[in-house]
Amino acid sequence: MAERRPRPAPIAKRHGWRRTAPPKASSAAGNGDQTNPETQPASPSPGPPDAASVVQAALYRDGVRVATPASLADTFRELREQRDGMAWIGLARPTEAELLSLAAEFDLHELAVEDAMEAHQRPKLERYGETLFVVLRAARYLDAQEEVDFGELHVFVGPDFVITVRHGAAPDLTAVRRRMEESPELLKLGPEAVLYAILDAVVDGYAPVVAGVQNDIDEIETEVFRGDPEVSRRIYELSREMVEFQRATRPLVAMLHSLMAGFAKYRTDEELQRYLRDVADHVTHTSERVDGFRQALTDILTVNSTLVTQQQNAEMRALAEAGFEQNEEIKKISSWAAILFAPTLVGTIYGMNFDEMPELHWTFGYPFAIGLMGVVCISLYLIFKRRDWL
Protein backbone atom coordinates (compact mmCIF):
# COMPACT_ATOMS: atom_id res chain seq x y z
CA MET A 1 0.00 0.00 0.00
CA ALA A 2 1.05 3.58 -0.53
CA GLU A 3 1.96 5.81 2.39
CA ARG A 4 -0.86 7.53 4.16
CA ARG A 5 -1.88 10.85 2.75
CA PRO A 6 -3.60 13.72 4.55
CA ARG A 7 -7.37 13.51 4.44
CA PRO A 8 -8.72 15.57 1.54
CA ALA A 9 -11.61 17.89 1.94
CA PRO A 10 -14.96 16.41 0.84
CA ILE A 11 -15.30 16.37 -2.91
CA ALA A 12 -18.03 18.75 -3.89
CA LYS A 13 -18.02 18.17 -7.63
CA ARG A 14 -20.63 15.91 -9.18
CA HIS A 15 -19.22 12.96 -11.10
CA GLY A 16 -20.53 12.45 -14.58
CA TRP A 17 -21.69 8.91 -13.78
CA ARG A 18 -23.95 9.92 -10.91
CA ARG A 19 -27.61 9.37 -11.57
CA THR A 20 -30.08 11.87 -10.21
CA ALA A 21 -33.70 11.16 -9.48
CA PRO A 22 -36.18 12.62 -11.95
CA PRO A 23 -38.13 15.66 -10.73
CA LYS A 24 -41.49 14.87 -9.21
CA ALA A 25 -44.52 16.15 -11.02
CA SER A 26 -46.41 18.92 -9.26
CA SER A 27 -49.83 18.06 -7.90
CA ALA A 28 -51.16 21.10 -9.71
CA ALA A 29 -49.93 19.91 -13.06
CA GLY A 30 -53.07 17.92 -13.61
CA ASN A 31 -55.10 21.14 -13.30
CA GLY A 32 -52.94 22.95 -15.86
CA ASP A 33 -51.33 25.27 -13.24
CA GLN A 34 -47.75 26.32 -13.90
CA THR A 35 -45.30 26.59 -11.05
CA ASN A 36 -42.52 29.14 -11.15
CA PRO A 37 -39.27 27.28 -10.45
CA GLU A 38 -37.64 30.43 -9.10
CA THR A 39 -40.11 30.53 -6.22
CA GLN A 40 -39.44 26.88 -5.22
CA PRO A 41 -36.93 26.09 -2.49
CA ALA A 42 -33.64 24.73 -3.67
CA SER A 43 -33.28 20.97 -3.55
CA PRO A 44 -31.08 19.84 -0.70
CA SER A 45 -27.64 18.68 -1.73
CA PRO A 46 -27.07 14.97 -1.40
CA GLY A 47 -25.70 14.51 2.07
CA PRO A 48 -24.42 11.40 3.81
CA PRO A 49 -26.84 8.51 3.79
CA ASP A 50 -28.66 7.31 6.83
CA ALA A 51 -27.34 4.33 8.82
CA ALA A 52 -29.86 1.83 7.47
CA SER A 53 -27.21 -0.19 5.64
CA VAL A 54 -24.24 0.67 7.87
CA VAL A 55 -23.35 -2.41 9.89
CA GLN A 56 -20.62 -0.65 11.83
CA ALA A 57 -18.27 2.27 11.43
CA ALA A 58 -15.27 2.85 13.66
CA LEU A 59 -12.09 4.92 13.82
CA TYR A 60 -8.78 3.46 14.95
CA ARG A 61 -5.45 4.94 15.98
CA ASP A 62 -2.39 2.78 16.67
CA GLY A 63 -4.51 -0.36 16.55
CA VAL A 64 -7.05 0.84 19.12
CA ARG A 65 -10.61 1.97 18.52
CA VAL A 66 -10.91 5.63 19.41
CA ALA A 67 -14.40 6.42 18.14
CA THR A 68 -17.61 4.73 17.04
CA PRO A 69 -19.47 7.38 15.03
CA ALA A 70 -23.22 7.09 14.86
CA SER A 71 -23.43 7.99 11.16
CA LEU A 72 -21.31 8.23 8.08
CA ALA A 73 -21.30 12.00 8.35
CA ASP A 74 -19.73 11.77 11.81
CA THR A 75 -17.25 9.22 10.49
CA PHE A 76 -16.17 11.57 7.71
CA ARG A 77 -15.84 14.50 10.07
CA GLU A 78 -13.85 12.68 12.75
CA LEU A 79 -11.53 11.08 10.21
CA ARG A 80 -10.69 14.51 8.79
CA GLU A 81 -9.93 15.74 12.29
CA GLN A 82 -7.69 12.76 13.11
CA ARG A 83 -5.02 12.86 10.44
CA ASP A 84 -3.27 9.68 11.67
CA GLY A 85 -6.44 7.62 12.15
CA MET A 86 -8.01 4.84 10.08
CA ALA A 87 -11.69 4.36 9.32
CA TRP A 88 -13.26 0.92 8.96
CA ILE A 89 -16.78 1.12 7.54
CA GLY A 90 -18.96 -1.92 7.02
CA LEU A 91 -22.02 -1.81 4.77
CA ALA A 92 -24.58 -4.49 3.95
CA ARG A 93 -26.48 -4.18 0.66
CA PRO A 94 -26.08 -0.38 0.53
CA THR A 95 -28.16 1.92 -1.60
CA GLU A 96 -26.79 3.90 -4.50
CA ALA A 97 -26.91 7.10 -2.46
CA GLU A 98 -24.77 5.57 0.26
CA LEU A 99 -22.13 4.41 -2.19
CA LEU A 100 -22.09 7.77 -3.95
CA SER A 101 -21.55 9.49 -0.63
CA LEU A 102 -18.59 7.24 0.14
CA ALA A 103 -17.22 7.72 -3.36
CA ALA A 104 -17.30 11.48 -2.97
CA GLU A 105 -15.66 11.38 0.46
CA PHE A 106 -12.89 8.87 -0.30
CA ASP A 107 -12.44 9.64 -4.01
CA LEU A 108 -13.33 6.11 -5.11
CA HIS A 109 -13.08 5.32 -8.79
CA GLU A 110 -16.37 5.33 -10.63
CA LEU A 111 -15.82 1.88 -12.19
CA ALA A 112 -15.21 0.33 -8.78
CA VAL A 113 -18.32 2.01 -7.39
CA GLU A 114 -20.42 0.74 -10.28
CA ASP A 115 -19.16 -2.80 -9.62
CA ALA A 116 -19.99 -2.45 -5.92
CA MET A 117 -23.54 -1.39 -6.77
CA GLU A 118 -24.14 -4.63 -8.64
CA ALA A 119 -23.67 -8.04 -7.12
CA HIS A 120 -22.63 -11.14 -9.12
CA GLN A 121 -19.15 -9.85 -9.89
CA ARG A 122 -16.27 -12.23 -10.45
CA PRO A 123 -13.49 -12.30 -7.81
CA LYS A 124 -10.82 -9.79 -8.78
CA LEU A 125 -8.20 -7.37 -7.51
CA GLU A 126 -7.81 -3.95 -9.13
CA ARG A 127 -5.82 -0.89 -8.18
CA TYR A 128 -7.11 2.61 -8.79
CA GLY A 129 -4.36 5.01 -7.77
CA GLU A 130 -3.87 4.63 -4.02
CA THR A 131 -7.01 2.51 -3.58
CA LEU A 132 -7.34 -1.24 -3.92
CA PHE A 133 -10.67 -2.69 -4.97
CA VAL A 134 -11.16 -6.36 -4.10
CA VAL A 135 -14.13 -8.59 -4.94
CA LEU A 136 -14.44 -11.83 -2.96
CA ARG A 137 -16.91 -14.71 -3.11
CA ALA A 138 -17.60 -16.13 0.35
CA ALA A 139 -19.30 -19.47 0.91
CA ARG A 140 -21.02 -21.31 3.73
CA TYR A 141 -22.45 -24.81 3.99
CA LEU A 142 -26.11 -25.14 4.99
CA ASP A 143 -26.49 -28.44 6.86
CA ALA A 144 -30.29 -28.51 6.79
CA GLN A 145 -30.56 -28.08 3.01
CA GLU A 146 -27.24 -29.85 2.30
CA GLU A 147 -26.23 -27.13 -0.13
CA VAL A 148 -23.65 -24.35 -0.49
CA ASP A 149 -24.72 -20.72 -0.11
CA PHE A 150 -22.53 -18.07 -1.74
CA GLY A 151 -22.17 -14.45 -0.71
CA GLU A 152 -20.28 -11.56 -2.26
CA LEU A 153 -17.99 -9.04 -0.60
CA HIS A 154 -16.51 -5.88 -2.09
CA VAL A 155 -13.61 -4.23 -0.26
CA PHE A 156 -12.14 -0.77 -0.82
CA VAL A 157 -8.70 -0.38 0.79
CA GLY A 158 -7.14 3.08 0.88
CA PRO A 159 -4.26 4.70 2.74
CA ASP A 160 -6.42 5.38 5.82
CA PHE A 161 -9.71 3.61 5.27
CA VAL A 162 -11.30 0.22 4.66
CA ILE A 163 -14.84 -0.03 3.28
CA THR A 164 -16.60 -3.37 3.02
CA VAL A 165 -19.77 -3.82 0.97
CA ARG A 166 -21.44 -7.13 1.68
CA HIS A 167 -24.01 -8.82 -0.58
CA GLY A 168 -25.16 -11.96 1.23
CA ALA A 169 -24.96 -13.52 4.68
CA ALA A 170 -21.32 -14.61 4.46
CA PRO A 171 -18.77 -13.81 5.70
CA ASP A 172 -19.27 -12.72 9.32
CA LEU A 173 -17.22 -9.53 9.40
CA THR A 174 -18.23 -8.85 13.00
CA ALA A 175 -15.97 -11.71 14.03
CA VAL A 176 -13.20 -10.30 11.85
CA ARG A 177 -13.46 -6.88 13.51
CA ARG A 178 -13.48 -8.48 16.97
CA ARG A 179 -10.40 -10.53 16.13
CA MET A 180 -8.50 -7.50 14.87
CA GLU A 181 -9.45 -5.37 17.87
CA GLU A 182 -8.13 -8.13 20.11
CA SER A 183 -4.81 -7.94 18.23
CA PRO A 184 -3.88 -4.24 18.29
CA GLU A 185 -0.32 -4.98 17.15
CA LEU A 186 -1.71 -6.46 13.95
CA LEU A 187 -4.37 -3.79 13.52
CA LYS A 188 -1.69 -1.14 13.93
CA LEU A 189 -0.29 -2.21 10.56
CA GLY A 190 -3.16 -0.37 8.92
CA PRO A 191 -5.66 -1.11 6.15
CA GLU A 192 -3.50 -3.85 4.66
CA ALA A 193 -3.83 -5.82 7.91
CA VAL A 194 -7.61 -5.46 7.75
CA LEU A 195 -7.58 -6.73 4.18
CA TYR A 196 -5.53 -9.72 5.31
CA ALA A 197 -8.03 -10.48 8.09
CA ILE A 198 -10.93 -10.31 5.65
CA LEU A 199 -9.15 -12.58 3.18
CA ASP A 200 -8.30 -15.00 5.96
CA ALA A 201 -11.92 -15.09 7.16
CA VAL A 202 -13.22 -15.76 3.65
CA VAL A 203 -10.69 -18.53 3.07
CA ASP A 204 -11.28 -20.09 6.49
CA GLY A 205 -14.99 -20.12 5.68
CA TYR A 206 -14.23 -22.47 2.79
CA ALA A 207 -13.08 -25.26 5.15
CA PRO A 208 -16.57 -26.19 6.47
CA VAL A 209 -17.84 -26.09 2.89
CA VAL A 210 -15.12 -28.50 1.76
CA ALA A 211 -15.96 -30.84 4.65
CA GLY A 212 -19.68 -30.69 3.90
CA VAL A 213 -19.17 -31.35 0.19
CA GLN A 214 -16.87 -34.28 0.97
CA ASN A 215 -19.60 -35.77 3.15
CA ASP A 216 -22.16 -35.24 0.36
CA ILE A 217 -19.92 -37.01 -2.14
CA ASP A 218 -19.52 -39.97 0.23
CA GLU A 219 -23.29 -40.19 0.59
CA ILE A 220 -23.76 -39.94 -3.18
CA GLU A 221 -21.33 -42.81 -3.77
CA THR A 222 -23.38 -44.98 -1.39
CA GLU A 223 -26.62 -44.00 -3.13
CA VAL A 224 -25.15 -44.74 -6.57
CA PHE A 225 -24.26 -48.33 -5.71
CA ARG A 226 -27.54 -48.74 -3.86
CA GLY A 227 -29.42 -47.83 -7.03
CA ASP A 228 -31.22 -44.74 -5.71
CA PRO A 229 -33.18 -43.26 -8.67
CA GLU A 230 -32.86 -39.69 -7.30
CA VAL A 231 -29.07 -39.71 -7.11
CA SER A 232 -28.57 -38.33 -10.64
CA ARG A 233 -30.37 -35.12 -9.72
CA ARG A 234 -28.28 -34.73 -6.58
CA ILE A 235 -25.06 -35.26 -8.55
CA TYR A 236 -26.12 -32.58 -11.04
CA GLU A 237 -27.02 -30.04 -8.35
CA LEU A 238 -23.79 -30.60 -6.44
CA SER A 239 -21.80 -30.32 -9.68
CA ARG A 240 -23.32 -26.90 -10.33
CA GLU A 241 -22.39 -25.80 -6.82
CA MET A 242 -18.83 -26.97 -7.41
CA VAL A 243 -18.68 -24.87 -10.58
CA GLU A 244 -19.64 -21.82 -8.50
CA PHE A 245 -17.17 -22.83 -5.78
CA GLN A 246 -14.44 -23.14 -8.39
CA ARG A 247 -15.25 -19.67 -9.73
CA ALA A 248 -14.89 -18.33 -6.18
CA THR A 249 -11.59 -19.99 -5.30
CA ARG A 250 -9.56 -20.22 -8.50
CA PRO A 251 -9.26 -16.41 -9.17
CA LEU A 252 -8.36 -15.90 -5.50
CA VAL A 253 -5.10 -17.79 -6.00
CA ALA A 254 -3.97 -15.36 -8.68
CA MET A 255 -5.18 -12.39 -6.62
CA LEU A 256 -3.04 -13.35 -3.61
CA HIS A 257 0.00 -13.96 -5.79
CA SER A 258 -0.54 -10.50 -7.25
CA LEU A 259 -0.58 -9.05 -3.75
CA MET A 260 2.59 -10.92 -2.85
CA ALA A 261 4.28 -9.63 -6.00
CA GLY A 262 3.78 -6.06 -4.72
CA PHE A 263 5.30 -6.64 -1.27
CA ALA A 264 8.60 -4.96 -2.11
CA LYS A 265 7.09 -2.13 -4.15
CA TYR A 266 4.60 -1.11 -1.44
CA ARG A 267 6.87 -1.96 1.50
CA THR A 268 4.48 -4.42 3.12
CA ASP A 269 5.34 -5.38 6.69
CA GLU A 270 7.27 -8.67 6.89
CA GLU A 271 4.93 -10.19 9.46
CA LEU A 272 1.96 -9.34 7.27
CA GLN A 273 3.74 -10.91 4.32
CA ARG A 274 3.96 -14.20 6.21
CA TYR A 275 0.26 -14.04 7.05
CA LEU A 276 -0.70 -13.41 3.43
CA ARG A 277 1.50 -16.28 2.23
CA ASP A 278 -0.29 -18.55 4.68
CA VAL A 279 -3.65 -17.46 3.27
CA ALA A 280 -2.35 -18.11 -0.25
CA ASP A 281 -1.35 -21.64 0.75
CA HIS A 282 -4.82 -22.31 2.17
CA VAL A 283 -6.49 -20.97 -0.96
CA THR A 284 -4.33 -23.12 -3.19
CA HIS A 285 -5.17 -26.20 -1.13
CA THR A 286 -8.89 -25.39 -1.24
CA SER A 287 -8.81 -24.76 -4.98
CA GLU A 288 -7.14 -28.13 -5.53
CA ARG A 289 -9.77 -29.84 -3.38
CA VAL A 290 -12.56 -28.20 -5.38
CA ASP A 291 -10.96 -29.34 -8.63
CA GLY A 292 -10.82 -32.83 -7.17
CA PHE A 293 -14.49 -32.65 -6.21
CA ARG A 294 -15.50 -31.73 -9.76
CA GLN A 295 -13.48 -34.61 -11.18
CA ALA A 296 -14.91 -37.00 -8.58
CA LEU A 297 -18.47 -35.94 -9.40
CA THR A 298 -17.78 -36.41 -13.10
CA ASP A 299 -16.48 -39.92 -12.42
CA ILE A 300 -19.44 -40.72 -10.16
CA LEU A 301 -21.85 -39.54 -12.83
CA THR A 302 -20.12 -41.79 -15.35
CA VAL A 303 -20.31 -44.76 -12.98
CA ASN A 304 -23.95 -44.03 -12.27
CA SER A 305 -24.73 -43.90 -15.99
CA THR A 306 -22.93 -47.22 -16.46
CA LEU A 307 -24.84 -48.83 -13.61
CA VAL A 308 -28.14 -47.49 -14.91
CA THR A 309 -27.33 -48.82 -18.38
CA GLN A 310 -26.42 -52.22 -16.94
CA GLN A 311 -29.64 -52.29 -14.96
CA GLN A 312 -31.64 -51.42 -18.06
CA ASN A 313 -29.84 -54.11 -20.05
CA ALA A 314 -30.59 -56.67 -17.34
CA GLU A 315 -34.25 -55.68 -17.37
CA MET A 316 -34.37 -55.93 -21.17
CA ARG A 317 -32.69 -59.32 -21.02
CA ALA A 318 -35.21 -60.53 -18.45
CA LEU A 319 -38.06 -59.29 -20.64
CA ALA A 320 -36.55 -61.02 -23.68
CA GLU A 321 -36.20 -64.29 -21.75
CA ALA A 322 -39.76 -64.04 -20.54
CA GLY A 323 -40.92 -63.38 -24.09
CA PHE A 324 -38.93 -66.37 -25.35
CA GLU A 325 -40.51 -68.65 -22.75
CA GLN A 326 -43.94 -67.37 -23.71
CA ASN A 327 -43.17 -68.10 -27.37
CA GLU A 328 -42.18 -71.67 -26.50
CA GLU A 329 -45.43 -72.21 -24.65
CA ILE A 330 -47.38 -70.73 -27.52
CA LYS A 331 -45.63 -73.11 -29.92
CA LYS A 332 -46.60 -76.12 -27.81
CA ILE A 333 -50.20 -75.00 -27.51
CA SER A 334 -50.40 -74.28 -31.24
CA SER A 335 -48.86 -77.67 -32.10
CA TRP A 336 -51.32 -79.67 -30.00
CA ALA A 337 -54.16 -77.57 -31.31
CA ALA A 338 -53.13 -78.42 -34.90
CA ILE A 339 -52.81 -82.14 -34.04
CA LEU A 340 -56.25 -82.24 -32.45
CA PHE A 341 -57.76 -80.21 -35.27
CA ALA A 342 -57.18 -82.96 -37.91
CA PRO A 343 -59.42 -85.69 -36.33
CA THR A 344 -61.92 -83.06 -35.35
CA LEU A 345 -62.16 -81.98 -38.99
CA VAL A 346 -62.67 -85.56 -40.26
CA GLY A 347 -65.17 -86.36 -37.55
CA THR A 348 -67.07 -83.18 -38.26
CA ILE A 349 -67.34 -83.97 -41.96
CA TYR A 350 -68.61 -87.51 -41.35
CA GLY A 351 -70.97 -86.23 -38.69
CA MET A 352 -73.05 -84.31 -41.20
CA ASN A 353 -75.09 -87.48 -42.03
CA PHE A 354 -75.79 -86.72 -45.71
CA ASP A 355 -77.28 -89.70 -47.58
CA GLU A 356 -75.27 -89.00 -50.75
CA MET A 357 -71.86 -89.29 -49.05
CA PRO A 358 -70.22 -92.35 -50.75
CA GLU A 359 -68.16 -93.34 -47.72
CA LEU A 360 -71.27 -93.89 -45.55
CA HIS A 361 -72.12 -97.19 -47.21
CA TRP A 362 -68.52 -98.31 -47.77
CA THR A 363 -67.44 -101.36 -45.77
CA PHE A 364 -63.98 -99.92 -45.05
CA GLY A 365 -65.19 -96.37 -44.54
CA TYR A 366 -64.92 -96.33 -40.77
CA PRO A 367 -61.46 -98.00 -40.53
CA PHE A 368 -60.27 -95.68 -43.30
CA ALA A 369 -61.46 -92.57 -41.41
CA ILE A 370 -59.82 -93.73 -38.20
CA GLY A 371 -56.60 -94.54 -40.01
CA LEU A 372 -56.62 -91.17 -41.78
CA MET A 373 -57.00 -89.40 -38.46
CA GLY A 374 -54.09 -91.37 -36.99
CA VAL A 375 -51.81 -90.76 -39.97
CA VAL A 376 -52.48 -87.00 -39.96
CA CYS A 377 -51.96 -86.71 -36.18
CA ILE A 378 -48.76 -88.75 -36.20
CA SER A 379 -47.40 -86.80 -39.18
CA LEU A 380 -48.10 -83.46 -37.50
CA TYR A 381 -46.55 -84.67 -34.27
CA LEU A 382 -43.36 -85.73 -36.04
CA ILE A 383 -43.14 -82.45 -37.93
CA PHE A 384 -43.56 -80.35 -34.78
CA LYS A 385 -41.18 -82.54 -32.84
CA ARG A 386 -38.48 -82.12 -35.49
CA ARG A 387 -38.86 -78.33 -35.24
CA ASP A 388 -38.63 -78.45 -31.43
CA TRP A 389 -42.07 -77.13 -30.98
CA LEU A 390 -42.94 -80.07 -28.75
Image (cartoon, rainbow, N blue to C red):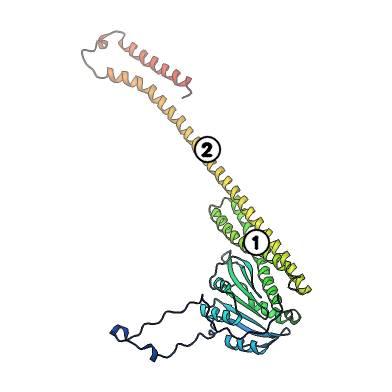
Q: Would residue 325 appear left or right of 176 to someone viewing this image? A: left
Counting other residues with Cα less than 10 Å from the Cα at mark 2, is it few (<14), some (14-19), or many (20 or more)?
few
Which secondary structure, mark 1?
helix
Residue nearer the viewer, 40 or 384: 40
Residue 173 vertical placement versus 336 (above, below) = below
Tell me which amino acid carries mark 2.
Arg
* Nearer to me, 335 or 246: 246
Q: Nearer the viewer, residue 168 or 267?
A: 267
Q: What is the x, y in percent for residue 378?
A: 42, 17
The residue positioned 63% from the left and 75% from the top of the image is 156
The answer to whether 288 is drawn above or below residue 169 in the figure is: above
Q: Which residue is mark 1?
A: 250
Query: Among all residues in the image, which is located at the extreme right?
Result: 270
Q: Say if mark 1 contacts mark 2, CB within 8 Å.
A: no
> Identity of the amino acid at label 1?
Arg
378 relative position to 295: left or right: left
Q: What residue occupies the far top of the structure in this picture? A: 363
Dot placed on the residue nearer the N-terminal end, 1 or 2: 1
Q: Quadrant of residue 175?
A: bottom right
Residue at 70 percent across and 73 percent down: it is 196
- The residue singled out by tag 2 in the image is 317
